[in-house]
Amino acid sequence: MNMNKNEFIKTLEKEDIHVTEMQMEQFEKYKSLLLEWNEKMNLTSITEEEEIWQKHFYDSVYPFLHLDFSNLCDVGSGAGFPGIPVKILFPNIELNMVEPLKKRCTFLKEVVRQLGLEKVNVYDQRAEDFAKDYRESFEVVSARAVARLTILLELCAPLVQKNGTMVALKGKNGKEELENAQLAIETLGLQMEKEELFESEEATRVNFYFKKVKNSPKKYPRAYGQIKKKPLGE
């Protein structure tokens, strides 16, 4: 099911989240910038208004509605999902976005500037390089549609502080990827906490929550070439 902006507001109200007028203005401005910049660079294939409210905005914020956190690191931010919608909804958190493509970083910085968002950092880096300086620094680390779970966990887990949470937003292959990721979960000091499955006529989405129960071994993440060639457990 896709949703319009009023359904977006009402659906969040059911979760006891009340979106202010200013926040709605920020979502609207973000939507405009996304569509404007999408004409000159490949940011998203989702351009219908109702799809944007559902798949980009609601699907981005839903996994974080009941988490208690003060900082978020979004790995492979792309066009800013889930990081920017989460930041709009929870303005007091510190948001760190890690995105290796310079053009996309330029877009993200422009969104941050035009929406007047504070406490946001955009890092033009690959996650495995970023981890050298920011190892185990974040309460919550998120990633959406970046890579298979075995690869994703190795890129993200080392950034999560002990007792923190990693949130992986996955599509229809999520369950299968989870089966292949058991060794990676164990090796990297994670523990599966819960999964949320959403099925509709258009799509299947699953969100995985992992708790960081012990520090990730120092040798991870490896160089991306190695991760891709020999994913943990595959």
Image: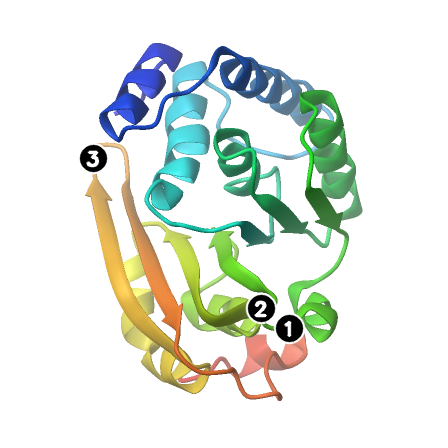
Secondary structure at numbered mark 2: helix
Secondary structure at numbered mark 1: loop
Residue 104 image offset from top left, x and y in percent: 72, 40
Q: Nearer the viewer, residue 190 or 34?
A: 190
Within the image, what quadrant is residue 158 found in? bottom right
Residue type beneath disc 3? Ser
Q: Nearer the viewer, residue 54 or 141?
A: 141
First-in-chain label (2 vs 3): 2
Q: Quadrant of the C terminus?
A: bottom left
Decide: is 111 above or below 184: above
Q: How many marks?
A: 3
Q: Is there CB contact under 8 Å for labels 3 and 1? A: no
State left or right for residue 168 relative to residue 203: right
Q: Which residue is mark 3?
A: 200
Residue type beneath disc 1? Arg
Residue type beneath disc 2? Leu
The mark closer to the camera, 3 or 1, is 1
Q: Which residue is mark 1?
A: 135
First-in-chain label (1 vs 2): 1
User: Label 2 to label 3, Cα distance in Å?
Assistant: 33 Å
Secondary structure at numbered mark 3: loop
Q: Quadrant of the N terminus?
A: top left
State left or right for residue 80 relative to residue 196: right
Q: In the drawing, what numbered circle is on residue 159?
A: 2
The mark closer to the camera, 2 or 3, is 2
User: Label 3 to label 1, Cα distance in Å?
Assistant: 37 Å
Q: Is there CB contact under 8 Å for labels 1 and 2? A: yes
Does the rendering let one see residue 208?
yes
Q: Residues within 10 Å of mark 1 (few under 14, many from 20)?
A: some
Residue 157 image offset from top left, x and y in percent: 50, 71
